[in-house]
Image (spheres, helix red, strand yellow):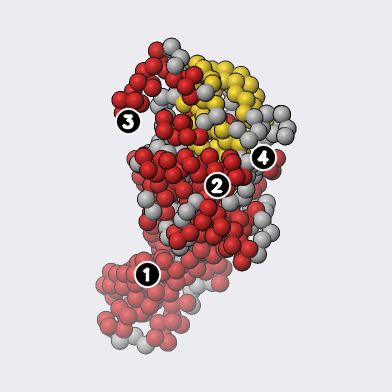
């Protein structure tokens, strides 16, 4: 197994106008591991994850994915890095004018040489993997929130990426759906060896999927370690965050 | 606009999406533009008849109708009606795709949202605007003929021959062809404003409204420029 980090962020800074969102973030994600970034709303979690896939460019700092300097790439070079990454968006981001099957085939048709029947087989296999093969002809609006997340996950893995980024994968879901989606994320790592980075403020999700937790506050990581280590940290922002979560649950 | 010109030539060419957009722009606008054309033709004939009779020139009504409809009213009104329907639709659709991260999803999957969303829509508008304009012109002339038939019992052969005797082929080509430029304006403005949406649904609504207003104003302004240029190049109808 390679010991080189799959994802590496070095001294990442990002501001929007007068608002500084990230202040010198360093993050290293090893192969076949699951890292979780936790933090309150507006702490910069989504901004951080968008840098990994080149949706945002840093004001200062470096972003590496499998050794490629993502923040300096564009065009086809950036596209080839992006093809090794699957991204589960907070809203699912399913194309609402397409059925579930069309959503998935849209990716396959444009990025593989597979025939129609091969693509159909792959779609069915992936939908079965997320437990929703019967939904292939439905539109996203006809699905529940949890089902939309699972379909979005199926679409994110249809091209078999080696890295998966999850932006609040369980936001707005009931506890049963949170567990279902979280367990799928664990299975992805165990069965397909996918390296993942998830940002979440969902304690149950973090408990199920995290190898390492990084706590982001005011644009900086306060602490990194196991979930228990992070929870027991004495920083007031962490106490307030986990105290609030315990009360909420 | 520069981005459009640069990326237009690059792969992938989204042929199926182009056809879908042509259907969206074209087939679904036939009723709206047809009703608009019919109303224009009938009203124009009804309102002009009295004045022409006063000057003893009722016979030139078909001629006047053809010149008005084909040279100016047909292309501009069709484009303005389409700007209302499509500008709002495209601005809102692309804007809501932006706020629900669907455009980001295309981008991170290396799927070139500009090709898929913008180039197809702009091309569809450029192809379908002239076709819909010809359709509107034809329906408007039919409306004018129906009015003439009911008001004066005019024979359709006389109506057609009188209508087209002062029109040159270049008039039809230039005045219908300019709607391809209007289509480009509606497509590019609406897509740009949709792409630029940041925030929530309120911004989507604003983008849709601004797309209609900006497209309409640009159509009117561009029309003035094109008419002036065509007069310089091709001369007036009577010359």
Mark 3 and mark 1: Cα distance apart in space? 55 Å
Q: Secondary structure at mark 2?
A: helix
Residue nearer the viewer, A81 or A208: A208
Tag on residue A82? none
Among the two numbered marks 4 and 2 on one chain, the one whose residue lies closer to the N terminus: 4
Q: Nearer the viewer, mark 4 or mark 2?
A: 2
Residue A86 x/y as whole percent: 58, 43
Chain for mark 1? B
Image spot of residue A67 (x, y percent):
71, 31
> Label 4 marks which chain's residue?
A
Query: Could you say which disc has been placed on residue A156 in the image?
Result: 2
**Does label 1 lie on the same chain as label 3?**
no
Tell me the quadrant of the picture where the C terminus of chain B can be found.
bottom right
Above or below for B203 versus A128? above
Mark on residue A81?
Answer: 4
Work out how far the residue at label 4 is from the one at label 1, CA to CA, in angstroms.
47 Å
Q: Badge 3 is on which residue?
A: A249
């Amino acid at each position: 197994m390679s010991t080189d980090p799959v994802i590496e962020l070095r001294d990442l800074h990002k501001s929007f106008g007068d608002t500084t969102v990230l202040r010198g973030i360093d993050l290293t994600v090893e192969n076949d591991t699951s890292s979780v970034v936790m933090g309150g709303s507006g702490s910069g979690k989504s901004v951080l994850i968008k840098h990994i896939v080149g949706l945002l460019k840093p004001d200062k700092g470096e972003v590496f994915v499998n050794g490629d300097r993502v923040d300096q790439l564009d065009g086809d070079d950036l596209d080839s890095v992006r093809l090794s990454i699957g991204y589960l968006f907070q809203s699912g981001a399913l194309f609402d004018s397409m059925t579930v099957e069309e959503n998935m085939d849209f990716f396959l048709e444009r990025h593989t040489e597979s025939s129609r029947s091969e693509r159909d087989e792959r779609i069915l296999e992936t939908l079965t993997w997320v437990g929703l093969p019967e939904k292939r002809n439905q539109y996203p609006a006809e699905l529940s929130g949890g089902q939309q997340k699972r379909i979005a996950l199926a679409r994110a893995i249809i091209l078999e990426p080696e890295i998966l980024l999850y932006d609040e994968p369980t936001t707005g879901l009931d506890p049963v759906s949170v567990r279902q989606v979280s367990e799928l994320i664990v299975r992805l790592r165990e069965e397909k060896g996918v390296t993942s980075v998830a940002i979440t403020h969902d304690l149950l999700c973090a408990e199920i999927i995290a190898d390492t937790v990084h706590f982001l506050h005011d644009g900086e990581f306060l602490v990194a370690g196991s979930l228990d280590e992070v929870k027991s940290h004495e920083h007031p922002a962490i106490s307030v965050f986990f105290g609030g979560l315990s009360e909420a649950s | 606009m520069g981005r459009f010109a640069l990326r237009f030539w690059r792969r992938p060419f989204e042929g199926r999406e182009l056809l879908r957009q042509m259907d969206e722009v074209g087939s679904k606008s036939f009723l709206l533009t047809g009703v608009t054309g019919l109303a224009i033709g009938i009203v124009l004939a009804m309102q002009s008849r009295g004045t022409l009779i006063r000057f003893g020139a009722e016979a030139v009504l078909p001629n006047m109708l053809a010149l008005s409809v084909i040279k100016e009213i047909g292309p501009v009104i069709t484009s303005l009606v389409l700007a209302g329907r499509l500008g709002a639709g495209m601005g809102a659709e692309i804007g809501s795709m932006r706020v629900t991260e669907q455009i980001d999803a295309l981008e991170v999957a290396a799927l070139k949202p500009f090709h898929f969303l913008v180039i197809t829509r702009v091309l569809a508008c450029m192809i379908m605007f002239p076709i819909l304009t010809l359709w509107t012109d034809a329906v408007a002339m039919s409306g004018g003929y129906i009015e003439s038939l009911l008001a004066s019992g005019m024979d359709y052969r006389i109506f057609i021959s009188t209508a087209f005797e002062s029109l040159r082929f270049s008039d039809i080509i230039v005045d219908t062809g300019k709607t391809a430029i209007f289509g480009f304006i509606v497509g590019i403005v609406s897509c740009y404003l949709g792409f630029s949406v940041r925030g929530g649904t309120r911004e989507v609504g604003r983008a849709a409204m601004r797309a209609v207003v900006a497209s309409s104003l640009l159509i009117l302004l561009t029309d003035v420029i094109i008419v002036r240029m065509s007069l310089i190049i091709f001369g007036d109808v009577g010359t």
